[in-house]
Image (cartoon, grey):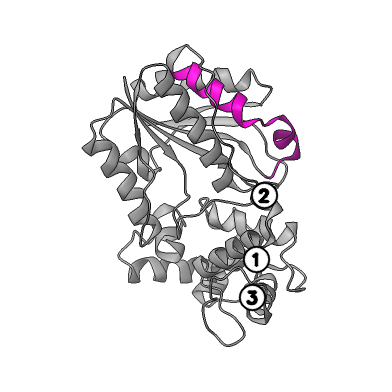
Amino acid sequence: MKFGIDSGHNCPPDTGARGIKFEDNLTLDVGNRVIAKLRALGNDVVVCRPSSASTVRDSLSKRCSTANGSKVDIYVSIHFNAFNNQANGTEVFATSETGRKIAKPVLDEIVKLGFFNRGVKSGSHLYVLKNTDMPAILIECCFIDSQKDMNLFNPEAMANAIVKGLTGKVASTPVNPVPDEEENADATILRLQKSLNRLKITDKNGKALVEDGFAGANTKSAVEKFQAIVGVQPTGVADSTTWNAINLILAKRIIRPNHAGGAVVRYLQYRLGVENDGVYGPQTEVVVKNFQKQNGLDADGIVGPASWQKLIG
């Protein structure tokens, strides 16, 4: 069997969410273990994560091109969720009946580790599932902003569950763990700078942040600006509340008129130049529809994947 294994994100500007842990670290750690274990069981494995990309879309496109060009039999994208510090559990996305049949045993094995079963779901909105030629699944292993999930999480156990779900077998293969970025303050600041740049949040001089991992005055001013936009006390320090707001926006969840509010709507209003009161009412809907028209999108007022792509890539 030939597997295409894609450790999600890990290719700036395509970077993952931050919660109690960093998504990039965990996807890479679990992905490396899955790759080693599949190979130890005699399978061919193609690493689909690109080494560089100019945009998030370019990163996603390269992953699909690698899988398609290598003619892998099954494509597996590994991710971790982040939402509101309360949601927890595991879900696996697929677009075809074959994909769902592959997803089910993977989900079942992960759930055996103690994670809440969120089910096999339609991945018709996910770029890598829409643009790969073979049966494909995207695994949201658990929530990195859930203390419950992070207490349960073990990269070796997670990798074993994924491999067993895919093959029915488990292999013990030594793999060097990915260092915990939480212990590296410079890496934390660098990820913050990358996130703010992706969100188009400039410093006090109206300039994009230099991504140097240094927490200077410019980075502090950009954090304060973001905090004021999303309704967080502007301290200039990226605390858990600030990171939660960043994660909520980067998750690019669908926003509908009269059915959304809070930090994500405030950010959306800021980007579109309307009063950011955090309420998606009639005035915001008009501005969203105008934005969609100007960008050649369906002007339905629903901020979905296409609209988010125009806003933050």
Q: Which amino acid does label 1 sit on?
A: Gly
Nearer the observer: mark 3 or 1; the answer is: 3
Magenta residues (range): 145-166
Among the two numbered marks 2 and 1 on one chain, the one whose residue lies closer to the N terminus: 2
Instruction: Estimate the x, y position of residue 39 in percent, counting from the top left.
Output: 40, 23
Magenta span includes 43: no
Secondary structure under the numbered disc 3 in the rendered image: helix
In this view, the residue in front, 148 or 26, is 26
Among the two numbered marks 2 and 3 on one chain, the one whose residue lies closer to the N terminus: 2
User: Which residue position is annotated with label 2?
Assistant: 19
Give the spatial CA distance, label 2 vs label 3: 20 Å
Is the C-beta separation of discs 2 and 1 under 8 Å? no
Among the two numbered marks 3 and 1 on one chain, the one whose residue lies closer to the N terminus: 3
User: Which residue position is annotated with label 1?
Assistant: 278
Q: What residue type is labelled 3?
A: Thr
Q: Give the vertical position of 231 relative to 108 (above or below).
A: below
Secondary structure under the numbered disc 2 in the rendered image: loop
Neighbour class for label 2 at 10 Å: few (<14), some, many (≥20)?
A: many
Give the spatial CA distance, label 2 vs label 1: 23 Å
In this view, the residue in front, 239 or 185, is 185
User: Which residue position is annotated with label 3?
Assistant: 219
Q: Which residue is drawn at 45% across and 65% down?
A: 311
Secondary structure under the numbered disc 1 in the rendered image: loop
Neighbour class for label 1 at 10 Å: few (<14), some, many (≥20)?
A: many
Instruction: Estimate the x, y position of residue 277 in percent, counting from the top left.
Output: 66, 70
Magenta span includes 150: yes
Q: In this view, does 96 lie to the left or right of 91?
A: left
Q: Residue furthest bottom?
A: 205
In this view, the residue in front, 274 or 137, is 137
